[in-house]
Amino acid sequence: MNRELILKALIDWNFWYKTQFTGYPRDDYVKKVLSVINSWYVASILGVKRAGKSTILNQVAKKLIESGIDPFDIFIINFEDGRLTSVQNVEDLFKLYEIYLEIRRRKDTKPYVFLDEIQRVNGWEGFVRSLIDRKEAFIIVSGSTSDLINENVRKKLAGRHVIINVYPLSFKEFLDFKGLSLRNETDLIAKEPEIKAVDNSFR
């Protein structure tokens, strides 16, 4: 495991020295994730490619930082990063975590661990269970549906995680993104011409 290469990857993925891309706010998902992890359950974020899982992780991190959490108390890593090919199994994952712990500024707080596309690491559920059972860290994992709810994961994390399914933008979110906020039924009726104009522009 190349320590310098690992550190460069960690710096690139985290908010330690720079602001990360957070995209269009998806507050419902962010609130749900925070509620789960603050209750000492693992938040398992599932979804297809391009559904926005990684962006939601960054939004959760940003919300934590805005609430006063030290950026160095947040550990985000995306296992699709080519620099992390040496992290292949649970033993490697523990070594990676130890590198992170060495560079944390504080030792009297619980870190927030974000493991993006974690299905690439064999036996990752053992690592997650170890941390959550000891209440050592708040944990969020993300990946594809089939990989994060297989039989082994269900056995290892039984009663310890909550699944949050993430979907591409809903039509309401799309309209919000276009500046058309719908708060109630009367908004829907009153703004019908504008909604149709937006819809027709994508046909």
Image (cartoon, helix red, strand yellow):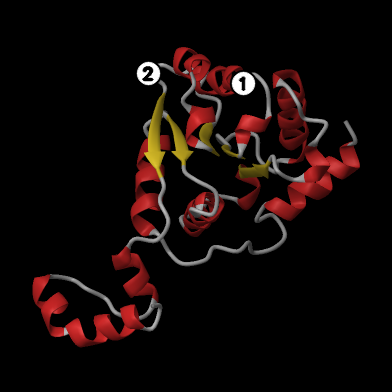
Residue 159 is left or right of residue 68, and the answer is left
Quarter of the image where one finds residue 76: top right
Query: Which residue lies at the image location 32% right of the left edge and 74% below the top edge?
Result: 175
Query: Which residue lies at the image location 66% right of the left edge and 40% below the top edge?
Result: 106
Which one is nearer the viewer's eye here, 46 or 75? 46
Residue 145 is left or right of residue 84, and the answer is left
Query: Which residue lies at the image location 52% right of the left edge and 34% below the top edge?
Result: 139
Mark 2: secondary structure: loop
Expressed as whole percent of the image width and height from the top left, the position of residue 195 reads: 26, 80
Query: Could you tell me if residue 24 is visible in this image?
Result: yes
Screen quadrant of the C terminus: bottom left
- The residue pinned by badge 1 equals 127
Screen quadrant of the N terminus: top right
- The residue pinned by badge 2 equals 159
Quarter of the image where one finds residue 104: top right
Mark 1 is surrounded, within 10 Å at the Cα level, by few (under 14), some (14 to 19) or many (20 or more) other residues, namely some
Marked residue nearer the N-terminal end (2 or 1): 1
Which one is nearer the viewer's eye here, 170 or 87? 170
Query: Could you tell me if residue 38 is visible in this image?
Result: no
Query: Where is 19 relative to 87, above or below?
Result: below
Which one is nearer the viewer's eye here, 98 or 12? 12
